[in-house]
Image (cartoon, grey):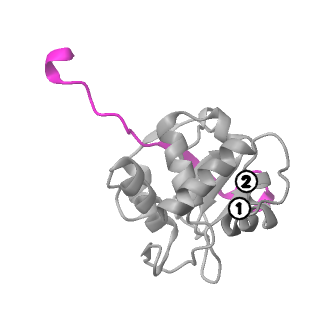
Amino acid sequence: MLFRFLVVAALLIGTAHAEPTPPADDMSRFMHERGLLARIGDVGEKMGTKASELVLNSMAFLGVPYKRGGNDAQTGFDCSGFVRAIYEQTAGLLLPRKAEQQAAATEKIDKKDLQPGDLVFFNTMRRAFSHVGIYVGNGKFIHSPRPGAEVRVEDMGISYWSKRFDGARRVATEEPAPLAAR
């Protein structure tokens, strides 16, 4: 897991502007062949440290299968289980289990204010906040989409997602100031 994270981090940092030459190691070759680096664009250069960690950690799970109620890489993830696992592993924060609960527990933000690491919500089951993903930048998000699919990066601008966009939320990742400092 740590190896995958380090490989993805190196790839994102080292290939932000140009299409890389085919890499030598297996993980790098896999990322290159699937066009994963091109899909996320120059995100690596534009993020803060915590957001960068969240996005890079989430990229390590590309290809993990969807599993209803799933919340780990060994058995698979559903959308909210994926988001919850990423925030718990990366930021040490335990988000609620369901997408609509995650929306209620986080700060509403405008779509124009989205930053990498923010949560994006969609109405995919004829109810508000029925699907969630993590914004990675450049109008793209990573998520565990549906049965038969795998964790992947998608463009929020495509018709399916833009019609179903429900809102964006920001997870407070900083500790509140001590009472004496307020």
Q: Which residue is mark 1?
A: 28
Kindly tell me whether residue 12 is visible in this rendering. Answer: yes
Residues packed near mark 2 inside 10 Å, few (<14), some (14 to 19) or many (20 plus): few
User: Is 151 situated left or right of 100 in this image?
Assistant: right
Return the x and y of residue 115 as percentages of the image width and height: 59, 37
* Residue plotted at (51% across, 80% down): 67
Kindly tell me whether residue 132 is visible in this rendering. Answer: no
Return the x and y of residue 77 as percentages of the image width and height: 49, 73
Residue sitting nearer the eye, 53 or 164: 53
Residue 138 higher or lower than 69, as above or below: above
Residue 11 higher or lower than 97, as above or below: above
Going from N to C along the chain, the mark reached first, 1 or 2, is 1
Q: Secondary structure at mark 1?
A: helix
Return the x and y of residue 160 as percentages of the image width and height: 75, 62
Q: What's the mark number on residue 162?
A: 2
Return the x and y of residue 112 as percentages of the image width and height: 65, 34
Question: Three-letter amino acid code at disc 1?
Answer: Ser
User: Is 151 situated left or right of 102 in this image?
Assistant: right
The boundaries of the magenta stretch are 155-182
Q: What's the mark number on residue 60?
A: none
